[in-house]
Image (cartoon, coloured by chain):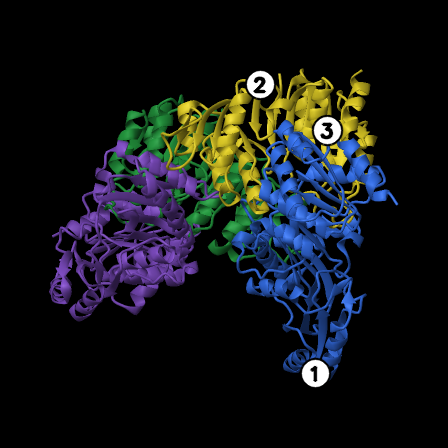
Chain colours: A yellow, B green, C purple, D blue
Amino acid sequence: MAIIIDENTRLIVQGITGNQGRFHTTQMLAYGTQVVGGVSPGKGGQEVEGVPVYDSAFAAVEAQNANASVLFIPSPFAKDAAFEAISAGIKVLVIVTEHIPVHDEMEIVEYASRNGTTIVGPNTFGIVSSGKCKIGIPPNQFFIEGPIGVVARSGTLTYEIVGNLTANGMGQSTVVGLGGDRVVGLSFVDVLEKFEHDPQTKAVVLVGEIGGNAEEMASLFIKDMTKPVVAYIAGKSAPPGKRMGHAGAIIERGKGTFNAKVEALQAAGARIATLPFEVPDLLREVIG
Amino acid sequence: MAIIIDENTRLIVQGITGNQGRFHTTQMLAYGTQVVGGVSPGKGGQEVEGVPVYDSAFAAVEAQNANASVLFIPSPFAKDAAFEAISAGIKVLVIVTEHIPVHDEMEIVEYASRNGTTIVGPNTFGIVSSGKCKIGIPPNQFFIEGPIGVVARSGTLTYEIVGNLTANGMGQSTVVGLGGDRVVGLSFVDVLEKFEHDPQTKAVVLVGEIGGNAEEMASLFIKDMTKPVVAYIAGKSAPPGKRMGHAGAIIERGKGTFNAKVEALQAAGARIATLPFEVPDLLREVIG
Amino acid sequence: MKLFEYIGKEIFSSFGITVPRGKMVTSPEEAAQVAAEIGGTVVVKSQVLAGKRGKGGGIKFASGAEEAREAAASILAITVQGHKVEKLLVEEKIQIDKELYVAITIDGSAKKPVIIASSQGGMDIEDVPDEHIVKCHVDVTVGVYPYLGREIARRMGLTGKQAANFAKLLPLLYKCFKDKDAELVEINPLVISGDILIAADSKFTVDDDALYRQKDVPYVEDRTSIEKQAHDLGLAFVELGGNIAVMANGAGMSMGSLDTLVHYGGSPANFLDAGGGTGMEGTAKALELLLQTNPRVIFINIFGGITRCDDVANALIQVKKTREIPVPVVIRLVGTNEQEGVKILNDNGIEAYKVMQEAAAKAVEIANAE
Amino acid sequence: MKLFEYIGKEIFSSFGITVPRGKMVTSPEEAAQVAAEIGGTVVVKSQVLAGKRGKGGGIKFASGAEEAREAAASILAITVQGHKVEKLLVEEKIQIDKELYVAITIDGSAKKPVIIASSQGGMDIEDVPDEHIVKCHVDVTVGVYPYLGREIARRMGLTGKQAANFAKLLPLLYKCFKDKDAELVEINPLVISGDILIAADSKFTVDDDALYRQKDVPYVEDRTSIEKQAHDLGLAFVELGGNIAVMANGAGMSMGSLDTLVHYGGSPANFLDAGGGTGMEGTAKALELLLQTNPRVIFINIFGGITRCDDVANALIQVKKTREIPVPVVIRLVGTNEQEGVKILNDNGIEAYKVMQEAAAKAVEIANAE
């Protein structure tokens, strides 16, 4: 088992003929993902790494019975591409693109929710059900199968933590990147809920950061979870009012502070890693 | 039993302090409808015929636990009022107003469908569950309780037919006015389906007219109904390309003709009244 | 309200849709001048609210100013599909590589806008086989994005730049449709000229009920004189050409009245929905309208709901007092305040029927009497 | 991007929201002139991107041109909340019967816009008790209709014309918010002046990611010189004031690096997300930026995903070749092309760490050494 995606996921790549799309198609194929088609208007009929290219997502879904898509599309055109995927019946849509205007993001998320499509991102590294399917951009070598569910707001930091897990022999069920923007499709709670019901997952690592109240909301759910949660929150040393790279990572009007998040998570029973490399040890403590 | 509304329906009147709103509130109260509140911005705290007036539909719903509303609101403001009612949680919304722009109507119908609100109208006389509840503008005296369901696109013609039924001792379960506009909330099929499942209803009278394809769609459903249907279609003598009063009553590009409708209904097993006054006799034949 | 081709094209152009260069003119002199400005071959098109103008001689090509003047003069002299020609559109002749069809209209049964497109443009869409027509409904809360244009282009068999240009055009056309409260926007043919798509014709119908908020759309009169008077009174009126003038309240009731008259062998002069709740004055004015159709008999069929029978009766008496009513009036009057209404009529020596079909039969009998 | 008060008010006004009469000026002379044009008492307000301007002496009242000139001169001479004053807004003094609060911003957890309103305006909304705050989410596919304004007005306790005017204002404010890609539009106070509602202040933040399509919103610079250079390179950069310059790839990783440095007793000079996939050239430029912070040590923490370790190593060597790097560099390098990267560094006499915490500890040790 795993959550959201697995070995039956049939992926199309929107923007497959661009540099990013082409490179990561190769990487995803190498990981074992079933990349069944690509979309690039005007380039239907071509192939990229042996993957057939279509003029529209509708054509790709029709021909390949795809159920997931990943966007490598520049931000001004991302909303159009996302709506296309959702209209075409895609059920899991991973939006890697960063710098999408937040009003576009709200519209994408609303339209997806009305159509029953799960949005991963925007501004995410993607999602990996280790050993089964990778959608997005993380380096392949660090993701091995195992019992740890990981859910995170940021990318490289997650590789760091997953790399540590793997180095410590702790594989992952699914690793989900929510995305670094203020408005993203999945929340911590959505993912925690799925991990709670996933038989493969024995413990969960939550990688949060300052800003917003996603971690506080998560703690309300963690309180009632049967599975242990280890959390790391980035940004302890960040000053208020400054956006730390991610649109969502900003302490405004005294809200979204490191302390508030850590206190909420601790009160809910989560173990807190003060620094990223402490995660494996804490996991060992909670799953024995 | 009855469909859509009954003795438990708790109605608010939006636009209650206008002439039409005031007059028909009196009439509906006289029929026995539970008119529990009125809405008129800036006039909250007043009373109309003993009915308390509120500043917004939210306030009225909150205070009175209302579940239905009727709009007596001029067309330029009807969309706003309809969205208000739907947002406030109203489940049956009767829109009497005529001349609402069709783009507004499409938006109202879409928003209602997303929120699970039934729209009766626009441009309808309303709906009567005889002996239980009347919402709208038809004259009270012709509606008596009984086994005949009536669904119609036009108003006065329906009074004529219902008047004939009543004169012939045939009471009505519910009489539904779909509305005369091109885009309305309920279709014949929606209502026929409810009549088919309503224990009180023994036979259905369908009052259609030229234009559109609502009657053709209805015939597809009638084919499989267990209850007999008698239909009258107005506009046999209407020339093509001319709008016969209702926005929807126009034969365009050879579509929506009288003959096509009658043939479809007859093929589906409905009995056709050539003139309005033939309906009671045909009913007598089918329900014995 | 239907718009002339040139108005529709002006609107298209203001939304970024490419149309041929051209100008509306009302005289041969202006036509010559515009033709000279444009240069090369021009097309002179009659501006009337009817299709198939070419077959009626309403469209002519012309090389240069002189030919344009002659073409304009000849078209201004004729009627096209029964319409007198008062305006012309003089346009550049465009290169036609292929003709497409695209329209957006309202699908009442889906309760949504519907996009209709075909790779076989230039003819009536009714004559295009179904397999060459692409239909697609629009979610009004979402609108039309370029992707929908790409997908429809694909289903039409367009490729490359032509597909990309169609994808650009479709959201503009939808914006036009929505912003202008249109019931129909149609481009037929949508001409492929190289890689460019050009709207070579326009059909544009604006929702009458939305005209109050479409003040910048120029008003186009398409009603007969009586229909216009009726419209100004807020009454729905259609001239039918027979000899029985008809007034009823409610559109369905009015149609039912016509059907009943025809059933008994009569020939209605008009459709008139006097509406619900039209007071005494409105009813009186409606009666005046009926007299303008020069009928042999007037048939009034009232089932009073909001309409009060006494108002109708009083209106009739009032008109009778202020002017001669030169033909018999057959009136059926039931419903709200029926007794009062019937009494007023009787007091003035007019009989009132209670049953619609009896009254209708009587009216036909009078109309058909030698 | 935050907008100055006067720009926000210009936008409000262009959407039909009433603002005080006034004008932006940059000199005492202009202030005097505008005050004379307006007449009566005016208010002279410093235009800086900070709140609580009144407390810092950044807002003054003035009767007539002379007083306005003096007020302007005195405000232009000071700094307000740490900001140098270069622009002033000179406005009519309006009659204040009551102060309200209204704002629309984005609620990330609801994933929707949220309207926040209060009958207690004029103070920080954080200081208003919850029971006096009305919050309401907006469905982006529906937008804001007058009814929502009426309902919020009712919950704020407004009645009569004031409620009606609030109901008119709210859809305009939402249109402003949406059309301008705002992250925040705030009117505090929204002044009740008789029956009129006047936006007496504006806070307006436009989404940086949407600036490409908001060309008509004037650009307001709110970055330090280094931050601006970083922004122009497409890098996220924040000055922090310490002595360890930091570069990492990824926002979370960068924050984690700072946290680790602080944990070991270090003091970071900056936040710098070098991004994913920044090539050799970008990395070299990022390094140049770091040197501008005059650090005692540079800490580079790379976990290569899209970023290739050999690119980072080559960039470092390149910068070293073209200019003196006057401080030690501690680099941690793992991930994509790790071996190649480490070899390049070693060939050039630079050690590479594999473990983040060891590298961080080393950097702190160097920075804190006497």
Chain ID at mark 1: D
The x, y position of residue D114, in whole percent, is 65, 47
Q: Is residue B20 visible?
A: yes
Chain ID at mark 3: D
- Residue nearest the viewer, comparing A30 with D65: A30
The x, y position of residue A243, in whole percent, is 70, 47
Closer mark to the observer between disc 1 and disc 3: 3
- Residue nearest the viewer, comparing C58 with A174: A174
Amino acid found under the numbered disc labelled 1 = Ala
In three-dimensional space, the C-alpha distance between marks 1 and 3, rounded to whole angstroms, equals: 68 Å
Is A137 placed left or right of A240 in the picture?
A: left
Chain ID at mark 2: A
- Residue under label 2, please give it: A132
Q: Is residue B129 visible?
A: no
The image's mark for residue D354 is: 3
Amino acid found under the numbered disc labelled 2 = Lys
Residue A255 placement: quadrant:
top right
- Residue found at x 88% / y 45%: D370
In three-dimensional space, the C-alpha distance between marks 2 and 3, rounded to whole angstroms, equals: 28 Å
Amino acid found under the numbered disc labelled 3 = Lys
The x, y position of residue D157, in whole percent, is 71, 56
- Residue nearest the viewer, comparing B274 with C66: C66
Is A97 placed left or right of C75 in the picture?
A: right
The image's mark for residue D65 is: 1
